[in-house]
Amino acid sequence: MTMIAAQAAADKLAENLVALDVSVPFVLSDVFLIVSGRNDRQVASISDGIEDKMLEAGYKLLRREGKTTGRWILLDFGDIICHVMHEQDRIFYDIERLWKDCPVISLASITTGAEV
């Protein structure tokens, strides 16, 4: 699931992709995928891309928050929660710092839109 969501984000030119294993401290989900977009429209596009690819792969979206503002969109697929954030909001909220004790999941196999 993580790789599908991360690749979908990368296909929409998301930046600074980080996946964290939050399964121990956060029992409601296993993974947080955090990605950035440069503007509100790109954040919405990245979110739509993740949602489309996950639905194609058979994963049901349980909840979506923040779509109307386009600054921080949260997509909850149960085992993975995707945080698609405007780059300025990501710097401000710094959620990676809040979850710094969680292991980072390697996304080395993800190809960026620039490489395709």
Image: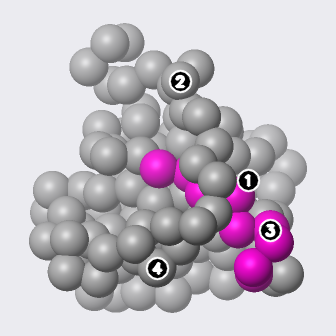
Residue 89's disc number:
none
- In front of the other: label 3 or label 1? 3
Residue at the top extreme, as displayed: 116
Three-letter residue code for mark 4: Leu
Decide: marks 1, 4 in contact (CB < 8 A)?
A: no
At a point 40% along the width and 72% down the height, the residue shown is 97
Residue 31 lies in magenta, yes or no?
A: no
Read off the residue under disc 3: 23
Residue 98's disc number:
4
Highlighted magenta segment, given as a residue range: 18-26
Q: Using the image as rendered, state which of residue 26 and residue 69 is in the foreground.
A: 26
> Residue 86 appears in which quarter of the rendering?
bottom left
Where does residue 76 sit, x and y in percent of width and height? 67, 74
Read off the residue under disc 1: 55
Q: Earlier in the sequence, mark 4 or mark 3?
A: 3
15 displayed left or right of 58: left
The kind of secondary structure element at disc 3 is loop
Decide: marks 2, 4 in contact (CB < 8 A)?
A: no
Decide: marks 4, 3 in contact (CB < 8 A)?
A: no
